[in-house]
Image (spheres, coloured by chain):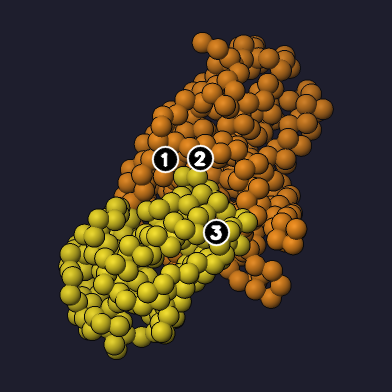
Amino acid sequence: MRQFFPVEELARDERFHTISNRERMGDPRTVFQTGEQSRRSNRLTPSRKDASDAARALMHGIFVGEIQALEGAGRTCHDFDTSTGTESRTDAVPFALKLDMARQAWDEARHVEISVRLSDWMGSEIGQFAENTVLFEAACSTDPVLRLAGVNRALEGLAIDVFTTMKEFGDLAGDPYLEFCEDWMLADEVTHVKMGSDWLRRVTENDPDRRKKALEFQSVVDKLFSYGGTRSDSEESPIGLARRFRELAGFTETEVDEIADVSRAALDERKAFVASARTS
Amino acid sequence: MSVTVTPQEFKFVAYDAALIRRVTEQLLDSLGLDRDVAIEVDETTPLARTRVDIGDTIAIRAESGAFEDTKRPRQQSENATATALGRVLLRVKDRLVGGFGEAPPDEDLSLAQVAAWDTYCVGRLNRLGIATNEQRWRYNFRNRHGFTDAADEAFDKLWFSDNLSWGELEAISTAIPS
């Protein structure tokens, strides 16, 4: 079986239509307002007029995200040699790390099945919305430590934010299945982030430069996964930052503040891009 | 009757004004509405709201997301266009000739009332041959009326009805125990 699989060759049937992050972010339209109106809330709650359609779209985003997370975790099991755990090689990982990635792949496969059922429950069809493949792209690094930073800490961190938002949505709307399923998946995501944080620390214990590089990569991915401010502390963002669950997953308060800062920057950049696209 | 669409050429999305006009004409014909329609598409937002003013001309303002193919962002979906315009035009027809005289103005409708009326509209669109995902609208209805058997029964009544008045629709919606 080949190693280091390119994003362009992910297996998808005719129901799916994939788009790149460049295409997604190149859309000059926006839900964000400028000036006085910019203080209004876009948070995904049942009180929004378009609540059920917005929740369906986000649920489909979760579904394809779970597929890519499964593909990414599976790849990390296979793409690298097995090390003893004491050496700092970029082409090998400890066997126990591979076991954790295998467990994560199992979790993600279960999440895919849950997401399909929830999408069906909410009235969506598989492939009804475009699939942004940026999540898998973050899992394509040739250094496994960068994958841990990009996938387990940034992507799975985003999953914590998304599942918290959806769980609260289900709770407020009185949707028993949504609230229940999101709560269980959220628990898994907290574990995945914790695994990433622990392994990142252990593998780079004697290699501070590599750790620094990995954390810088995480910051870049965190900004990408803010999707132009779709996720941030601001009420303008549909998805909030789940600070409490991030703490449980091993993020320090400073780290969460840093993510809040890059998310806010992504929101501001998105608004500036849209303003410029409208005047050109 | 005439149908006008603005803009005629789109900058932010790849929509076809002629397709929007054709879909609208077919809907007017199917619904037996004989009135001019002016459609303005706001292509600066991906949201999907529609607003309508009923005068000598039916003036519809639609955000671009209302006509969008969610699988291919910024591309138009004929089905989404027909569903969005069909919902609007059925509400117009209800207000003009369908016993909805006492219905509040659109901006004063509660979320539950909107969901009930949407259910009534989309059920009829489905019977006109416009493909719809019933579960999508059931989920929307449940979000506003509760995830209960009583809410599902009310949904079925609205979905399969053809000649309700506003009072009857309102009675079905409000009879659901909270």
Amino acid type indicated by mark 1? Gly
Which three-letter amino acid code belongs to the residue tagged 3? Pro
Residue A97 rendering spot, x and y as whole percentages: 58, 22
| Residue A28 visible in image | yes
Residue at image mark 2: A131
Label 1 marks a residue whose chain is: A
Q: Is residue A219 shown left or right of residue A240?
A: right
> Pointer 2 and pointer 3: residues touching (CB < 8 Å)?
no
Determine crowd level at label 1: few under 14, some 14-19, many 20+ residues with C-alpha closer than 10 A: many
Chain for numbered disc 3: B
Separation (CA) of disc 2 from disc 3: 17 Å
Disc 3 versus disc 1: distance between alpha carbons? 19 Å
Same chain under badges 2 and 3? The reply is no
Query: Residue B46: which disc?
Result: 3
Say if mark 1 contacts mark 2, CB within 8 Å.
Answer: yes
Q: Position of residue A95 (x, y in %)?
A: 57, 16
* Helix, strand or loop under label 3: loop
Mark 2 closeness class: few <14, some 14–19, many ≥20 residues within 10 Å = many
Query: Hey, which quadrant is residue A238 in on the image?
Result: bottom right
Based on the displayed image, in which of its 4 quarters is residue A220 positioned? top right
Q: Is residue A105 left or right of residue A265?
A: left
**Residue lying at 69% horizontally and 46% vertically, measured from the top left:** A223
Residue at coordinates 55% horizontally, 59% vertically from top-left?
B46
Identity of the residue drawn at 57% across and 65% down: B7
The numbered disc on residue A127 is 1
Nearer-the-camera pick, A184 or B104 = B104
Q: In the picture, one chain is yellow; tell me its letter.
A: B
Q: Chain of mark 2?
A: A
Rounded to the nearest angstrom, the CA distance separating label 1 from label 2 is 8 Å
